[in-house]
Image: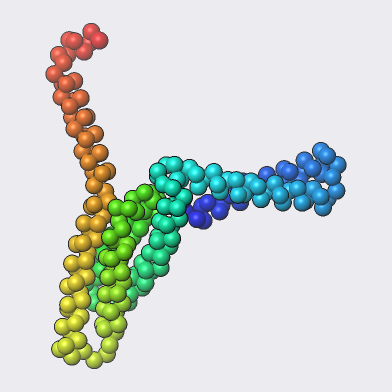
Amino acid sequence: MNKFLLRFMQTGSAIPFSAFIWLLAYAGFDQTFWMSSLYGVIGGGVMFFGVGYYLERRVLEKNRLTKKEYKYIQRNLREANVKIKKVQKSLFSIRHIRSLKQRMELLRLVKNIQRLNTREPRRFFKAEQFYFSHLDSIMELSEKYAFLSSQPGKNRELERSLYDTQDTLKELTKIVEKDLSYMLADDIDHLNFEIDVAKHSIKKLNEIPDETRRLK
């Protein structure tokens, strides 16, 4: 679950509950203002952490993950966010119009993978090669490409390095496409199965004579 959304839900539950406990203690049990405030803070804290625990348990159950696996995935996704920001900064700083479309496609694929894993952490295990190998290569090459392309004087050797780096980024784009396809393979298989079932049902329905359908 998105960390901001989690904190928002925790705070949105804790504040009204804290106010209710304060009012109950102050007006219902004739406690002093400060004692009521203390009970309110304690009640709000219990609600805050209780909601966090409940929502985390729901995420773990939905994704069939242990707490250790979930923390491991979240840590790697946070590290990936830092790398993706560096990739984006590097790719946007390159002044080469002809490669712009390819660079934007690479960035789109990278962000799609990250978005899918953030929403459904269970998918991370099918994207480990992307996170532990391909993303690092993309970051390093993007930064190298941005640095070399920013140099004022470009000799033949530098131009060759730029071309090789650009060509390698193209190959990495194809690899990342495969990473995304591999992540979505189960979804595609499930969709194809549902389509086959629907087609079979439609075929059987079409084989029933119109008179029989009217009798039903």
Up/down of 165 relative to 84, above or below:
below
Residue 24 makes an appearance in the image: yes
**Where is residue 181 drawn, in percent x and y?**
23, 52
Q: Quadrant of the C terminus?
A: top left
Residue at figure coordinates x 17%, y 73% from the top left: 167
The answer to whether residue 216 is above or below residue 203 is above
Position of residue 3 measured from the top left corner of the image (x, y, whole percent): 50, 55
Q: Nearer the viewer, residue 60 or 152?
A: 60
Number of dots carrying numbers:
0
Position of 25 with respect to 115 (left or right) is: right
Query: 11 or 134, which is in the foreground?
Result: 134
Which residue shows up at 31% across the image and 69% down it? 136
Q: Nearer the viewer, residue 170 or 189?
A: 189
> Which quadrant of the view contains residue 114?
bottom left
**Side of 33 relative to 136 (left or right):** right
- Answer whether residue 98 is visible to the viewer in this image: no
Quadrant housing residue 73: bottom left
Color scheme of the displayed model: rainbow
Q: Position of residue 12 (x, y in %)?
A: 60, 48
Which residue is located at x 44 percent, y 48 percent? Answer: 66
Q: Position of residue 25 (x, y in %)?
A: 79, 43
Residue at 13%, 18% (x, y): give it. 207
In which quadrant of the rendered view does residue 180 lie? bottom left
- Closer to the camera, 66 or 194? 66
Q: Residue furthest top?
A: 215
Work out whether 94 lies above or below 152.
Answer: above
